[in-house]
Amino acid sequence: MAESEDIFLRAKHRTFSGLTEDAEREWTGPFYFIQAADPQLGLMKAWRDGDCEGGGDEWGEEVELTKQAVEAVNQLRPRPRFIVLCGDLVHAMPDTPFREGQERDLKATLKGTDPSIPLVFVSGNHDLGNTPTPRTLEQYCGAWGNDYFSFWVGGVLCLVLNSQLFYDGSACPQLKEAQETWLEEQLSRASSSTEPRPKHVLVFQHIPLYLKSPDEEENYFNLQKGVRQNLLDRFKKAGVKAVFSGHYHRNAGGCHDGLDMVVSSAIGCQLGEDTHGLRVVAVTADAIVHRYHSLDQLSAEGVSEDLRKLLQV
């Protein structure tokens, strides 16, 4: 995986030029990466104040938690191949007060990440707005890179999706359709007999397909049933092994018909009984195995022993 300018993976096209080289398409043995979600600078105080719509005027707590996450990852040996942040980077919606300051401070904190560990960004509803528009998408892409794209790492194909276009793309139908067309091409190629076959296919998006069961009722924290089933069918057909998400601010998910729906809690504000943390994901020839680590646990103990054993060649 090639490093990119300023340690941020910035997708200028729908694939990263540094990550599509032949070497990354070849399986070379087990590796691991870090999945994080919802640093969401500004939410913790807003949640305590009961003003999640208009709050978010302080975000020092989230900065310190993100700094702790960066320091915990930096000390890991061997290094993870990458860190993926699954959306809601900041709390302030587009074109609202505090947005610029929250983005500035998050970027400054993430720049402490060791330069050998690339960062991959996934868009969330607070990054784009609950109903994204061409303007909010342009703003996001200018700040963080493309809202959907693919990359290869160690023989594994990774697809980063804009789940807000699945949830409500009514204000930008052409952009919604563009992602659909691109995704169908990616999934078709992943299962093609004439293309290099990935060892695994992984998906990263902000909103989970579901929280516990594919047939659960719709709510704010999952995708609508029709959209959900459509994606499940397409992912399974293409051999997608796991979908990683955030949004719920709690750990959840489940494995159904061989597809693992992984819902990770937040670096920032917790809405349940989990602690601030990160998910360590081990990739072996046969499986994707993951464990959620609290920030304190990862700082003090590193990667859990069972995952370390899986990574031994």
Image (cartoon, rainbow, N blue to C red):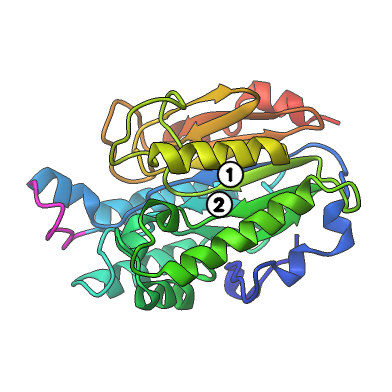
Q: Position of residue 279 (x, y in %)?
A: 53, 36
User: To which quarter of the image does residue 305 belong?
Assistant: top right
- Residue type at mark 2: give it: Val
Residue 53 among those drawn in magenta: yes
Mark-to-mark CA distance, 2 and 1 = 6 Å
Q: Label 1 belongs to which residue?
A: 34
Q: Does residue 222 appear to the left or right of 73 in the view shown?
A: left
How many neighbours does mark 1 have within 10 angstroms: few (below 14), some (14-19), or many (20 or more)? many
* Residue lying at 58% horizontally and 74% vertically, measured from the top left: 6
- Residue type at mark 1: give it: Ile
Q: Position of residue 202 (x, y in %)?
A: 65, 43
Residue 300 seen = no
Q: Label 2 belongs to which residue?
A: 84
Q: Position of residue 273 (x, y in %)?
A: 30, 25
Dot 2 and dot 1 residues touching (CB under 8 Å): yes
What is the quadrant of the N terminus in the image? Answer: bottom right
Would you say the magenta stretch is mainly helix, strand or loop?
loop
Region in magenta: 50-58
- From the viewer's perspective, is residue 311 above or below residue 80? above
**121 or 133, which is in the foreground?**
133
* Residue lying at 48% horizontally and 57% vertically, measured from the top left: 162
Residue 52 among those drawn in magenta: yes
Q: Does residue 149 appear to the left or right of 247 in the view shown?
A: right
- From the viewer's perspective, is residue 207 above or below residue 213? below
